[in-house]
Image: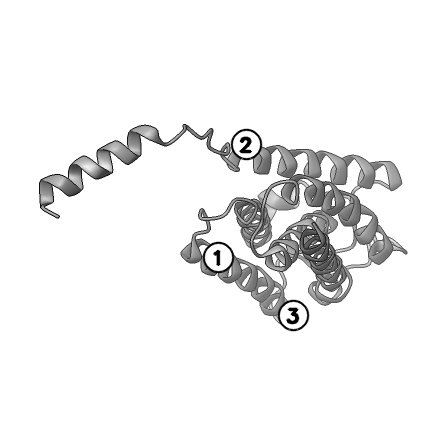
Amino acid sequence: MTHQNRLDLIKELSTNVPSVRPRGSVLLPAILWFSLNWIYVISLSIYLGPLRPNAIESLLISPQFAFESSIGFISGALFCLIAFQESIPGIRRQWLIYLTYFSALFWISCYVFGLWFPALEPSLIGKRAHCVLEAYLYSIPPLSVAYLIIYRRFPLNSLQAGVFMGIGAGMLPALFMQFSCMYDPQHMLTHHIGPITITVIAGALLGVVFKKQSNLK
């Protein structure tokens, strides 16, 4: 077959292919979920108790506190984005996944660094007696909503999608706890970041359930 014949064949085949409506961008649902999640976390947290005194002012007083909070915010947004990217085959960006994991490790390292050089003076002021349970209350419902959004599409790796969303759903309340609970880097690592492991397990279980349901269809 000559080169011209190949071109004619490709043209003929392409003209007979029915048009397919592409999936919409994941950016809008990701931003929507991320924004509504923040509204939910902040509203419920304030309903359950006041913010730590001078917590907001600390962002202006301590550049280190503002920096570590900003890194946590960015990392949470990135995990939300890559989780929603898993819902549509072919749009995953491996470099973005690496960047997201790096941002999370960098965020955690800020508090490890704070064990010796804390951004604020460690104090029991504002301590919430049940902050670990609150973390689950803030993260599990948004994780369930994300499950319904993502898995109605077609994630090829449902387990990875669940893990990503579990981390993202857990990071938001962990970060806000820096304003609604006591400030202490060790407390942050054990009581605020620690519960993320449970949301990761929950997200992974949702991914496994989805995969089994898909295999039964």
Q: Which residue: 55% across, 64% down? A: 105
Mark found first going from the N terminus, 2 or 1: 2
SS at circle 3: loop
- For disc 2, the marked residue is 28
Query: Which is nearer the N-term, disc 3 or disc 1?
Result: 1
Residue at which label 3 appears: 115
Residue 102 placed where, x, y %?
49, 62
In the depicted structure, whether residue 6 falls above or below residue 72: above
Q: Nearer the viewer, residue 159 or 176?
A: 159
Q: Residue at x 55, y 48 (%)?
A: 70
Q: Residue at x 63, y 43 (%)?
A: 150
Which label's residue is closer to the chain start, 2 or 3?
Answer: 2
Q: Is residue 121 left or right of residue 129?
A: left
Q: Is residue 20 rendered to the left or right of residue 50?
A: left
Marks 2/3: CA–CA distance: 38 Å
Res. 97 mark: 1
- Amino acid type at circle 3 is Leu
- At x 75%, y 67%, the residue is 190
Query: Crowding near pointer 3: few (<14 within 10 Å), some, many (20+)?
Result: some
Alpha carbons under labels 3 and 1: distance apart: 28 Å
Residue 209: x and y in percent read: 74, 56
167 over 32 or under it: above or below: below
Dot 2 falls on a residue whose secondary structure is helix
